[in-house]
């Protein structure tokens, strides 16, 4: 975080323009991350749409992931001199960024194009899919985010 903060602040000092770093990942704020039911950590492995906890099963062939403690990232970023600009769900970030306006560019009557795009947007936004599972943290310097990106802000939950 100190390296990222130093780069953003040096760029701001040199150019007068602000900059941001955006983290988009699985994760939780600390008060959810350290719940008793996560006493084994958050490591999860996936192979051919099957989830399991063994990182040594089929090395190199499976996906291995762990959730992020977004509170820790935010604290370190702020302590390194960055501004905490936003913390939200993927759905909130995409809605604030105008994903529905992008989808609306495809005529609904053009079902061959509209239905796959609509299904993809649904998966990205749905709380039961990726919309709540992924979170977005934005830290930066010399930047004010557009109001639309702040509508779903959850910084108070960090």
Image (cartoon, helix red, strand yellow):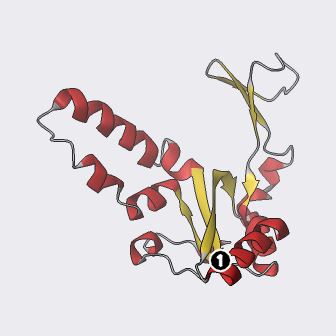
Direction from residue 78 to residue 102 in the image, left or right: left
Q: How many marks?
A: 1
Direction from residue 111 to residue 80 in the image, left or right: right
What x and y, as percent, mark residue 56?
88, 22
In the depicted view, which residue is nearer to us: 26 or 99? 99
Direction from residue 88 to residue 106 in the image, left or right: left
Seen at 58% across and 48% down, the residue is: 133
Q: Secondary structure at mark 1?
A: strand
Seen at 69% across and 74% down, the residue is: 11
In the depicted view, which residue is nearer to us: 1 or 47? 1
Seen at 59% across and 56% down, the residue is: 135
Query: Is 10 rendered above or below residue 95?
Result: below
Query: Is 65 rendered above or below residue 47?
Result: below
Which picture quadrant has residue 47? top right
In the depicted view, which residue is nearer to us: 116 or 22? 22
* Image quadrant where one finds the N terminus: bottom right
* Image quadrant where one finds the C terminus: bottom right
Q: Which residue is mark 1?
A: 84
What x and y, as percent, mark residue 78?
75, 79
Query: Is 74 rendered above or below residue 117?
Result: below
Label 1: few (<14), some (14–19) or many (≥20) C-alpha neighbours in 10 Å: some
Seen at 80% across and 20% down, the residue is: 60
Outermost front residue: 14
What x and y, as percent, mark residue 120?
38, 37
Which picture quadrant has residue 109? top left
Query: Is 146 rendered above or below residue 130?
Result: below
């Amino acid at each position: 975080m100190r390296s990222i903060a130093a780069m953003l602040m040096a760029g701001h000092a040199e150019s007068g323009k602000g900059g941001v770093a955006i983290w988009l990942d699985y994760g939780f704020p600390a008060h959810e991350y350290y719940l008793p039911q996560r006493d084994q950590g958050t490591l999860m492995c996936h192979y051919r749409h099957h989830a399991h906890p063994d990182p040594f099963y089929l090395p190199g062939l499976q996906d291995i992931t762990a959730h992020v403690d977004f509170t820790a990232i935010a604290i370190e970023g702020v302590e390194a001199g960055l501004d905490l600009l936003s913390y939200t769900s993927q759905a909130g970030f995409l809605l604030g960024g105008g994903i529905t306006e992008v989808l609306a560019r495809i005529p609904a009557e053009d079902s061959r194009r509209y239905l796959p795009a609509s299904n993809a947007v649904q998966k990205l936004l749905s709380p039961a899919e990726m919309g709540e599972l992924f979170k977005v943290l934005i830290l930066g310097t010399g930047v004010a985010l557009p109001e639309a990106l702040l509508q779903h802000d959850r910084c108070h939950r960090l």
